[in-house]
Amino acid sequence: QVQLVESGGGLVQAGGSLRLSCAASGRTFSYYAMGWFRQAPGKEREFVGAISRSGSTTDYADSVKGRFTISRDNAKNTVYLQMNSLKPEDTAVYYCAADFSERGSRYSSRYDYWGQGIQVTISS
């Protein structure tokens, strides 16, 4: 079992920044690629980005590429999502997830464990 807890969400103005953290406990964190997903009201959950086990490889959705950065600290069992130049359309509940694979995936069904989600609201 892996337990994931997100933190760092909140309300910011458009153009601002937030950094989400996802702290993991349980099984060895470095065995898992990590992903971030989000779900806006009335919409399906969508892929935001993923980072490989070692942190050497990342992948991003086109909608956030160049604005969001994923990183991880395996010594701290934590993955981060740095979000810059935020837009109102980034408003959603953000989830981190763990995938027992090397690189992670854009498909939510591939992930084994999920956090409870955290609200991010961007005002215009």
Image (spheres, helix red, strand yellow):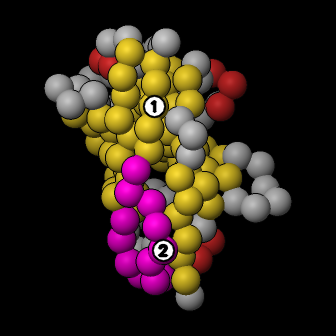
Residue at the disc numbered 2: 11
Specify start and end residues of the magenta stretch as a single range.
7-18
Say if 58 sits above or below 84 in the image. Answer: above
Q: Secondary structure at mark 1?
A: strand
Tell me, yes or no, whether the highlighted magenta stretch contains residue 58: no
Say if 11 sits above or below 42 in the image. Answer: below
Crowding near the residue tagged with mark 2, few <14, some 14–19, many ≥20 C-alpha atoms within 10 Å: few
Say if 2 sits above or below 68 in the image. Answer: above
16 relative to 89 in the view: left or right = left
Residue visible at 59% across and 34% down in the picture? 106
- Mark 1 → mark 2, Cα distance in angstroms: 22 Å
Residue visible at 62% across and 61% down in the picture? 92
Residue at the disc numbered 1: 4
Viewport quadrant of the C terminus: bottom right
Q: Furthest-right residue in view? A: 42
Type of amino acid at the residue the image marks with label 2: Leu
Q: Which mark is residue 121?
A: none
Q: Nearer the viewer, residue 47 or 65?
A: 47
Q: Nearer the viewer, residue 56 or 13?
A: 13
Type of amino acid at the residue the image marks with label 1: Leu
13 relative to 90 in the view: left or right = left
Q: Nearer the viewer, residue 24 or 30?
A: 24
Quick check: marks 1 and 2 in contact, CB under 8 Å? no
- Using the rendered image of the protein, determine whether residue 90 is visible from the camera's viewpoint: no
Q: Position of residue 82 (x, y in %)?
A: 34, 56
Q: Earlier in the sequence, mark 1 or mark 2?
A: 1
Tell me, yes or no, whether the highlighted magenta stretch contains residue 11: yes
Q: Position of residue 46 (x, y in %)?
A: 66, 47
Q: Secondary structure at mark 2?
A: strand
